[in-house]
Amino acid sequence: MFVGGTHLVTLPRGRPHPNGKHDQVVDYWHVIHSFRRKPMALLNLVHRDRLFPRDAYGRTFDCLRPRLPDRKACRIMVDLLALAHVRGCEAELAEHLAADHNPGQLPTGRLCAYFAPDPACVPHVVVQLAPQVQRLMIFFYRASQFMGSLLSRSGVFDLPRGLLKVRC
């Protein structure tokens, strides 16, 4: 895949097998937004094993399913995939998931806190807006200039120059 002339990534291709079937290439980045709206779609997905970016994600889902209701297990797994997608920590999250398969703990809260951005690194931005009265006066002034130029260009109306101006 290229952006302009810069090579970003090489995506795998689905190659045909000797039996005539094509291999399916599924990337969770393309479907994570749909799964966030409907997490239960993960349960009966045909290509679910190919969807997980690493084996640790599949093993985590296999550990969650017998211990939790399907709805809860799917929600947790979609939250983990979304965390990997949004934070860009797919490999590191897989290491944490592979190291810890404690059935008593649900991994999302602890991992979300671990991968959250450091509050000290987040810049504090203050945006000062002009008072609404000033913004409206500027808007009406520009609108009157625009309308005046349209009317004088048409030749139908010849208005005196200062008629449409708004006094500030």
Image (tube, grey):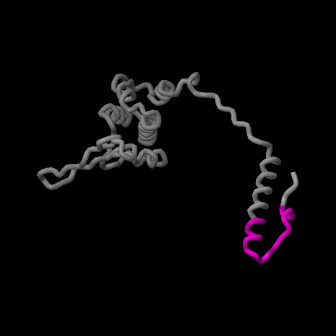
Please tell me which residue is depicted at 23% across the width and 49% down the height of the picture. Answer: 14
Q: Position of residue 151 (x, y in %)?
A: 76, 70
Most foreground residue, 38 or 85: 85
Q: Quick check: is 152 in the magenta stretch?
A: yes
Q: Quadrant of residue 56?
A: top left
Which residue appears at 47% of the width and 30% of the height?
Answer: 108
The answer to whether one can see residue 132 in this image is: yes
Image position of 76 (left or right of 121):
left
Relative height, residue 115 to residue 86 (above, below): above
Q: Nearer the viewer, residue 57 or 31?
A: 31
Q: Residue at x 40, y 43 (%)?
A: 29
- Residue 53 occupies which quadrant of the picture? top left
Residue 65: image location, x then y, percent = 37, 37
Q: Position of residue 79 (x, y in %)?
A: 46, 37
Number of disc labels: 0
Near-viewer residue (54 or 165): 165
The magenta region covers 147-164
Q: Is residue 20 rendered magenta in the image?
A: no
Residue 99 vertical placement versus 86 (above, below): above
Q: Position of residue 16 (x, y in %)?
A: 17, 52
| Res 69 seen here | no
Figure check: 59 above or below 149: above
Q: Is residue 113 above or below residue 167?
A: above
Q: Residue furthest left?
A: 18
Residue 125 vs residue 162, the one in the foreground: 162
